[in-house]
Image (cartoon, rainbow, N blue to C red):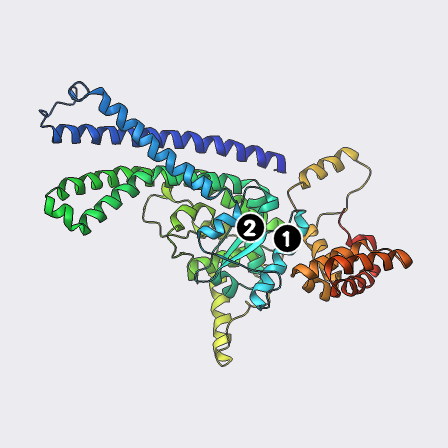
Amino acid sequence: MDFFEQQHRARRRTWLMLLLFVLAVVAIVTAFDLVCAIVYVWLFDVPIPNSNGLLQQVPRSVYVWSTLATLLVIGWGTASRLVQLSGGGVAVADLIGARHVKRDSGEPAERRLLNVVEEMALASGITVPLVFAMDDQQAINAFAAGYSPHEATVIVTRGALEQLNRDELQGVVAHEFSHILNGDMRLNIHLLGVIAGIVMIGSIGAFLMTGIRDGDDLRRAGTDIRVFFLGLLLWLIGSIGVLAGRLIKAVISREREFLADASAVQFTRNPDGIGGALFKVGRRGSTIAQRHAEELSHMCIGAPVNDYFEFALFHDHPPLDERIERLLGPGAKRLLRERTERAEAAALSARGSPVVSELVSPLYAARAAPPPASSLAGAPGIARSLVESIGNPSSAHLDHARGMLDAIPAEIRAAVGSEKGAEAALFALLLGDGELRKAQLALIGERSGAEVPAQSARFADALKPLGARARLP
């Protein structure tokens, strides 16, 4: 499937989401109208009508105002959340309290993550996403967020940083890049707004029940029972929204997870990476202790909340066993378990040293061979191959990106993590020779301070042997 077909599928999923949202709103409005009719009958001592006479005995204005109130609450919940997330991926990171991992981080695990993300971005031809870490979450999980590939963010838990080896981390990042390139992120943020709206009624009901339980004044006035039951009814109506939200997320996201897993294998040419990561997700957990975890569940690589619903229809992630078997074949989970147990036993025998990587030998010796070089004999085939490669990077792209990054001097790669270092590197790319360089360096010194010109000149000399191949078009 090429990039354009993936984008078309994303647009179809958007229309499906809107249809399900409308159906959920209709169900909530109908339930709320019924509750309002019951409350009206109760408060005003109207004779309890039969099922056919309820509409006639309750004034139509009750239904009109209850419908408008329900639509207003749902609309307000959706609009407020979308406004809150208008900043894209950074806004989502702020919502959950994730920390920005800066490019000059000296922590080895964070440096490894930054390098992997940088390689993936270069191979994909997109802006390097900002990276965030959820430091207080020891489970293994990750997700991408944003409105477009050029302002995306990649957010990982501390557990993913510390418990995954490089191949597994690369598989997880490749999985998230699939979501970035396939147009899933914008849909995910819109889905956050949809879910916030349809669960708002239940949130109000829960607030009323909690407020009445703690409210002495209302208890003394003798009205607490009625308001408590009103809150209970609203909470029950809100459960329709929760179920609808689960169903919408399940319909939208389950198949995308399979696609992202397969894309990660195509990208890295290493099924053990993403397969091993998914095995560790199942073994060590992916649950996130965060109040927005339910809203974000459709975005994560592993389910961040426990599935309380027994019916698979409401699960927004496919079963991990099925995902692993699709990647590695039948019996893969048993082999992964044996390999992990051997690695952990070896680590324990080595005076308790932590497991920093799995066994070196791969689960399967066979690896997909890199695609053969194209021949100029068939121009139509070349054109078709070019179109199919758009937004669909392969392991060859990743190898090329890694080679380009490795060719850049380590001093320059480290320097661009700071503002002044990045400024010096940019000036280095623009410096000329001879007298022109002297004039340029003098101008740089006037504008940027005394340190930048010398650093720019040093960087320019270091980059010169690389030639034009180190410059992006």
Residue at 19% from the left image edge and 21% from the top image edge: 59
Secondary structure of the residue carrying tag 2 is strand
Q: Nearer the viewer, residue 378 or 366?
A: 378
Q: Nearer the viewer, residue 243 or 148?
A: 148
Say few, some or many: other residues with alpha carbon within 10 Å of mark 2 (under 14 / 14 to 19 / 20 or more).
many
Tell me: 197 left or right of 179: left
> Residue at position x 89%, y 57% from top?
433
**CB under 8 Å between discs 1 and 2:** no
**Front-lying residue, 395 or 173:** 173
Left/right placement of residue 412 relative to residue 147 reads: right
Nearest to the eye among marks 1 and 2: give it.
2
Disc 1 packing (10 Å; few <14; some 14–19; many ≥20):
many
For label 1, the SS is helix
Inspect the image, locate mark 2, and give the three-letter code of the amino acid beneath it.
Thr
Q: Is residue 430 visible?
A: yes
- What amino acid type should be assigned to the residue bearing mark 1? Met
| Label 2 sits on residue | 153
Q: Residue at x 41, y 59 (%)?
A: 285
Instruction: Give the quadrant of residue 57.
Output: top left
Q: Residue at x 44, y 45 (%)?
A: 298
Question: Where residue 314 appears, x then y in whole percent?
Answer: 36, 42
Position of 177 with respect to 433 (left or right) is: left
Q: CA distance from mark 1 to mark 2?
A: 13 Å
Q: Is residue 293 left or right of residue 444?
A: left
**Outermost residue toward the front?**
446
Image quarter where the N terminus lies is top right
The spot of residue 73 in percent (x, y) is 33, 35
**Residue 353 higher or lower than 57, as above or below:** below
Instruction: Tell me where residue 178 appears, x and y as whole percent.
Output: 57, 46
Q: Read off the residue under disc 1.
A: 120
